[in-house]
C-alpha cells in the first residue's frame, strides 16, 4: 500500500495537518496507536460517563469578525465554519501569589492592564512598553534562545509581577525550566492575556468528532490501533513505515507528530545528547454534583497559584510540587448549559523519573496516586475553601499515565525543551509537526499541523 501523505499521530496537530492536506489532494492517512484520536487532549469512560483527559480551556479566543486572529485563520485553513461549534468564553481567571497578591484577567485585555496599573504602578509604563514591543515582534522567526526573564527584568521593576505574568504562560506552554524563549512568551502572552480563553460546547469528544467527520468527508483515512514501529528510509529519504503488526505502508511524504526524540527513535537514530530535564505534571479531576456548585468559586474559571516565597517552574525533587499549580473550574464559562455534575481540576509539576521508578511497583504507584490526590485537595482547599466532602468521583493522571497513553517521553506534555521550529529534520520528505515543532496547546498544535503541511508538502505538489 502506498499513500501520498502518512501522518504519525492522531492528536490535534495530526488531525489538523490531515484535514489541510485532504482539502487539496486525496490519499492522506493518519496512523494512531490508540483506539481513539485526540492524543493529549482526549477522553475516556468510567461507569458509563465520559471524562475529558485534560481540557481546561482553549487559548486564542477571537470574535468571529477578527479575520486575522489565529483561531479564525485556523478555521479558514481547515474550511471549518464557526457555526459548526459553540464557543463559551471564560468568566475571568486569576493569578494568585502567596494567597494575597492577585491579578485578575479575562478575555478583555484592558482588565489586566488596569490591574497592573493599580497593583504594580511602578511597572505600569514598562508593561505598556512590553505590549508595544510584542505587537511589533515576529515570534515565528528562527532565532537562538532569548531569555524572557532577562528581557522582562529590563522592562518591569517588580520581580513579583514578572513571576506572576510568567506563571500562567509557563504552565500552559513552556517546556523549559524557570524561563521561556522570548518567541514562545510572545505567542503565549497573546494567546492567554490578549486573546483569552474559551471552551467548545459539549465535550472534547464532540469537538474531535466534528474534526474527524470533516476529515472523512474530504476523503481522508484514519487508522486507530495502528502503532508505527519504524520509519523506513534510505539515507535522507523516507519510503514509509512499518507497524508493530509487521505491516508496511509506503508514502511520498511523512509527517510525524509524536515528538522529536520519539521520531528519532522510530528512525533508529541515536538519542541526541542534550540532557535537559523535561517537565511533567500530575493532573487530578474531582467531580461533584451540580447542586454543590455554590460551595466553589462562582466567578473564576482558572486560578494559577503560587504559595512559595519564589515561583519555581522546574522538575521537583519530590514526586510532586504542590507549592504552585493550576486550579480549573470547567463549569465556569459563559453560557454553558447546566450539567448533572461539575468538576474541579488541578495541575502540579511532577518529577517524571520519580514516577517512573514506581512503574513496576503497582501497589506503591497506586498509593502515591492516592497521596497525590489527597495533598492536591488539601492545597486546593486552602485556596478555594472546602469541597472534599462533596466529591463523588476522582482520578489522577501521572507522567506515567501520559507516557502510556500518548507515548510522550517522560510524560512531558510540552515535549522536548529543544524545538525544531521549521519542522525540518534534514530529510527530503519527513517533517515534524505538533508539540516539538514549538506550537503548544490545542490551537497551537493545530496551527503547527496546518503550517507544516502548507510549507513543506502542499507547496511541492
Ligand atoms: C492533562 C492535560 C491537559 C491539557 N490541557 C490543555 C488545555 O486545557 N488547553 C490546551 O490548549 N492544551 C491543553 N493540553 C495540551 C494539548 O493537549 C497539547 O498541546 C496538544 O494536544 C498536543 O497535540 P499534538 O498533536 O502535538 O500531540 P499529541 O496529542 O501527543 O499527539 C500525538 C499522537 O501520536 C500518537 N502516537 C505516539 N506514538 C505513536 C506511534 N509510534 N504510532 C502511532 N501513533 C503514535 C499518540 O498516541 C498521540 O495520539 C493539555 C494536555 C494534557 C496532557
Image (cartoon, helix red, strand yellow):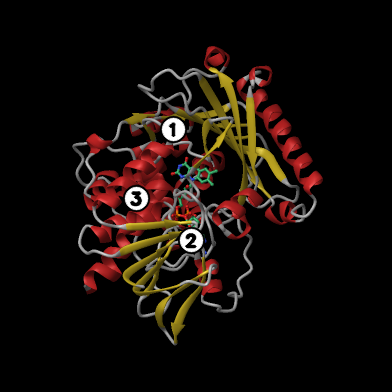
Which disc, if any, is residue 226? Answer: 2
Q: Nearer the viewer, residue 98 or 225?
A: 225
Q: Which tag is nearer the camera, tag 2 or tag 3?
A: 2
Quarter location, residue 57? top left
3D distance between C-alphas at marks 2 and 3 = 42 Å
Secondary element at image label 1: helix
Q: Horizontal and vertical percent for residue 223?
A: 42, 58
**Which corner quadrant holds the C terminus?**
bottom left
Which disc, if any, is residue 171? Answer: none
**Which corner quadrant holds the N terminus?**
bottom left
Which disc, if any, is residue 116? Answer: 1
Query: Measuring 54% from the left and 54% from the top, which residue is drawn there?
Result: 406
Q: Horizontal and vertical percent for residue 301?
A: 47, 27
Q: Are marks 2 and 1 in contact (CB under 8 Å)?
A: no
Q: Are marks 2 and 3 in contact (CB under 8 Å)?
A: no
Of the image marks 2 and 3, the number of the one nearer the N terminus? 3
Quarter location, residue 458? bottom left
Q: Horizontal and vertical percent for residue 124?
A: 41, 37
Disc 2: residue Cβ within 8 A of ligand 1's nearest atom: yes
Residue topped by disc 3: 134
Q: Nearer the viewer, residue 29 or 391?
A: 29
Q: Crowdedness of circle 2 by 10 Å Cα count: few (<14), some, many (20+)?
A: many
Q: Horizontal and vertical percent for residue 294?
A: 54, 12
Amino acid at each position: 500500500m502506498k499513500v501520498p501523505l502518512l501522518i504519525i499521530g492522531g492528536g490535534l496537530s495530526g488531525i489538523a495537518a490531515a484535514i489541510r492536506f485532504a482539502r487539496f489532494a486525496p490519499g492522506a492517512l493518519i496512523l494512531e496507536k490508540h483506539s481513539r484520536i485526540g492524543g493529549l487532549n482526549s477522553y475516556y469512560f468510567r461507569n458509563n460517563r465520559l471524562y475529558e483527559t485534560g481540557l481546561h480551556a482553549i487559548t486564542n479566543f477571537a470574535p468571529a469578525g477578527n479575520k486575522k486572529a489565529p483561531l479564525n485563520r485556523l478555521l479558514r485553513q481547515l474550511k471549518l465554519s464557526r457555526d459548526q461549534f459553540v464557543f463559551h468564553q471564560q468568566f475571568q481567571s486569576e493569578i494568585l501569589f502567596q494567597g494575597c497578591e492577585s491579578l485578575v484577567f479575562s478575555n478583555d485585555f484592558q482588565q489586566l492592564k488596569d490591574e497592573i496599573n493599580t497593583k504594580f504602578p511602578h511597572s505600569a509604563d514598562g508593561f505598556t512598553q512590553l505590549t508595544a514591543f510584542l505587537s511589533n515582534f515576529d515570534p515565528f522567526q528562527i532565532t537562538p534562545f532569548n531569555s524572557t526573564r532577562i528581557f522582562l527584568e529590563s522592562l518591569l521593576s517588580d520581580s513579583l509581577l514578572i513571576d506572576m505574568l510568567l506563571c500562567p504562560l509557563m504552565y500552559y506552554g513552556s517546556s523549559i525550566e524557570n524561563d521561556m524563549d522570548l518567541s514562545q512568551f510572545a505567542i503565549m502572552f497573546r494567546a492567554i492575556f490578549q486573546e483569552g480563553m474559551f471552551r467548545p460546547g459539549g465535550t472534547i469528544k464532540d469537538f474531535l468528532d466534528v474534526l474527524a467527520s470533516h476529515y472523512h468527508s474530504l476523503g481522508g483515512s484514519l487508522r486507530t490501533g495502528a502503532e508505527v514501529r519504524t520509519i523506513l528510509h534510505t539515507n535522507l529519504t523516507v519510503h514509509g513505515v512499518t507497524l508493530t503488526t509487521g505491516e508496511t505502508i509506503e508514502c511520498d511524504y511523512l509527517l510525524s507528530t509524536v515528538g522529536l526524540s520519539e521520531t528519532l527513535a522510530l528512525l533508529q537514530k541515536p538519542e541526541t545528547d542534550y540532557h535537559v530535564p523535561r517537565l511533567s505534571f500530575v493532573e487530578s479531576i474531582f467531580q461533584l454534583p451540580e447542586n454543590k456548585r455554590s460551595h466553589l468559586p462562582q466567578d473564576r474559571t482558572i486560578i494559577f497559584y503560587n504559595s512559595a516565597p519564589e515561583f519555581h517552574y522546574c522538575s521537583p525533587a519530590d514526586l510532586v510540587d504542590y507549592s504552585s499549580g493550576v486550579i480549573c473550574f470547567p463549569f465556569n464559562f459563559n453560557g454553558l448549559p447546566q450539567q448533572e455534575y461539575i468538576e474541579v481540576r488541578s495541575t502540579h509539576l511532577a518529577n517524571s523519573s520519580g514516577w517512573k521508578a514506581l512503574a513496576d511497583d503497582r501497589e506503591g504507584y497506586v498509593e502515591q496516586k492516592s497521596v497525590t490526590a489527597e495533598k492536591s485537595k488539601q492545597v486546593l482547599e486552602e485556596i478555594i475553601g472546602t469541597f472534599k466532602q462533596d466529591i463523588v468521583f476522582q482520578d489522577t493522571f501521572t507522567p506515567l499515565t501520559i507516557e502510556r497513553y500518548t507515548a510522550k517521553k517522560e510524560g512531558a506534555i510540552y515535549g522536548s525543551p529543544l524545538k525544531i521550529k521549521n519542522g525540518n529534520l534534514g530529510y527530503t520528505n519527513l517533517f515534524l509537526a505538533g508539540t516539538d515543532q514549538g506550537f503548544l496547546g490545542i490551537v497551537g498544535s493545530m496551527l503547527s499541523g496546518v503550517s507544516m503541511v502548507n510549507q513543506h508538502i502542499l507547496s511541492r505538489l
